[in-house]
Image (tube, helix red, strand yellow):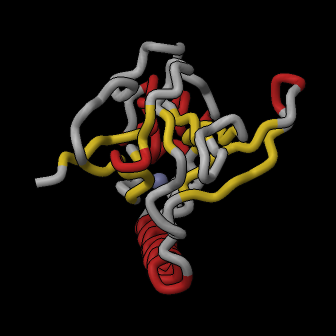
Amino acid sequence: MKAKLILMMLILAVQFIFAQTAELKGDKVNNKVIKSENEWKKILSPEEYKVLREKGTECAFAGAYIHNPEKGVYECKACGNTLFSSEKKYDSGSGWPSYRTPFSEESVELKIDHSLGMVRTEVICKRCDSHLGHVFTDGPEPTGLRYCINSLALKFKKSK
Ligand SMILES: [Zn+2]
């Protein structure tokens, strides 16, 4: 009985050390936020989880930020990374918040997405790899890009 308890504590201690080093590495090397799907489920609502972690898409014209007129920045709902600015937001008429460019080099990463029988470019958060939406090439000049993002993946922070 006692041996079992000691073994258990040893396993817990080792797991703790591994978790700590993983976190340190993440912070130091590339600032990544890495969590298990169970941890994400605890942080996110079921709707947010579906979009961010299962690459879901919210219904068109259903999101909270499509017509948000306020000035500020849009952060990743999962990890808080700054993703887009209201300055680069425009009304695309598509039913989803649309942006001409991301906030910075550290905001997003692009990935080819072959789902639903289409070839699209997926937009993911550079810090936590969560799904945000897609980028299309029918946007306004000068970039010609339309970052089509789910409101559920975003958290708006009003500028002071
Ligand atoms: Zn994120």
The image quadrant that residue 153 belongs to is top left
Q: Position of residue 53 (x, y in %)?
A: 57, 39
Say which of 86 and 119 sits in front.
86
Above or below, 97 relative to 132: above
In the visual, does 84 lie left or right of 86? Answer: right
Residue drawn 86% across and 35% down? 119
Residue drawn 44% across and 54% down? 83
The image quadrant that residue 70 belongs to is top left
Q: Position of residue 125 (x, y in %)?
A: 54, 54
Outermost residue toward the front in this view: 141
In the visual, does 153 lie left or right of 116? Answer: left
Q: Position of residue 24 (x, y in %)?
A: 45, 82
Say which of 160 and 124 sits in front.
160
Outermost residue toward the right in this view: 117
Residue drawn 42% across and 71% down? 9
Q: Position of residue 19 (x, y in %)?
A: 48, 72
Residue 75 seen in this snapshot: no
Outermost residue toward the left in this view: 160
Residue 117 seen in this snapshot: yes
Outermost residue toward the bottom in this view: 28
Locate the C terminus and report the quarter of the image it occupies: bottom left
Residue drawn 66% across and 41% down? 135
In the rendered picture of this protein, how many numbered marks are placed on residues? 0
Locate the N terminus and report the quarter of the image it occupies: bottom left
